[in-house]
Image (tube, grey):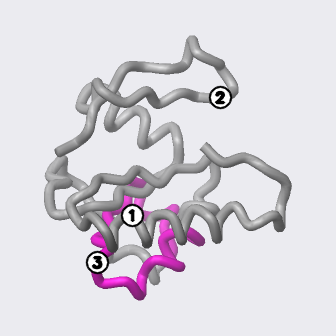
């Protein structure tokens, strides 16, 4: 989890970390999530040019910009993807039952908001 004030390089650090992890291990599974659609959009956009990053977006289609709509997935088959992106609540709601080895927490609710989860692969 990365937190900080605007303009401190959070998105750059996240995007570069994702790019490097997936370059070394294309079979890794990464969940990119934020409280805002704008932050998720920016992260996804910066990763569009990298062929080793296979993106899926979990969101309502109306909340995703046209340039990213090709990444939207409706079903539960995330096997072809190594990066799943979405805002916190939809990601937590969609993956909580499917990901028991990972803890996804809502920081506004503290540990009470955390649910045990696991990898989607």
Q: Is residue 46 magenta?
A: yes
Q: Residue 107 shows which numbered tag?
A: 2
Q: Position of residue 36 (x, y in %)?
A: 63, 53
Direction from residue 37 to residue 31 in the image, left or right? left
Question: Contact, CB < 8 Å: mark 2 with mark 3?
Answer: no
Residue 110 position (above or below residue 61): above
Task: Specify start and end residues of the magenta stretch as a single range.
Answer: 41-65
Direction from residue 101 to residue 88 in the image, left or right? right
Residue ID for mark 1:
21
Q: Position of residue 24 (x, y in %)?
A: 31, 69
Image quarter hosting the N terminus = top right
Closer to viewer: mark 2 or mark 3 = 3
Closer to viewer: mark 2 or mark 1 = 1
Q: Position of residue 112 (x, y in %)?
A: 57, 12
Give neighbour class at mark 3: few <14, some 14-19, many 20+ (Cα, 10 Å).
Answer: some
The Cα–Cα distance between marks 2 and 1, rounded to whole angstroms, is: 25 Å
Image quarter hosting the C terminus = top left
Frontmost residue, 104 versus 61: 104
Q: Residue 39 shows which numbered tag?
A: none
Q: Earlier in the sequence, mark 2 or mark 3?
A: 3
The Cα–Cα distance between marks 1 and 3, rounded to whole angstroms, is: 10 Å
| Quadrant in which residue 10 is drawn | bottom right
Q: Earlier in the sequence, mark 2 or mark 1?
A: 1
Residue ID for mark 3:
52
Which residue is painted at 46% across and 77% down in the image?
47
Residue 60 position (above or below residue 21): above
Closer to viewer: mark 1 or mark 3 = 1
Secondary-structure class at tag 2: loop
Q: Is residue 79 magenta?
A: no
Which residue is painted at 33% across and 27% down in the image?
117
């Amino acid at each position: 989890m990365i937190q900080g004030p605007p303009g401190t390089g959070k998105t750059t650090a996240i995007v570069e970390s994702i790019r490097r992890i997936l370059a070394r291990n294309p079979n890794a599974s990464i969940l990119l999530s934020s409280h805002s659609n704008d932050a998720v959009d920016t992260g996804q956009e910066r990763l569009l040019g990298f062929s080793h990053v296979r993106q899926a977006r979990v969101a309502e289609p109306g909340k995703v910009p046209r340039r990213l709509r090709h990444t939207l997935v409706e079903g539960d088959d995330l096997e072809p993807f190594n990066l799943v992106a979405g805002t916190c609540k939809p990601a937590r709601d969609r993956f909580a039952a499917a990901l028991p080895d990972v803890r996804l927490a809502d920081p506004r609710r503290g540990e009470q908001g955390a649910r045990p989860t696991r990898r989607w692969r």
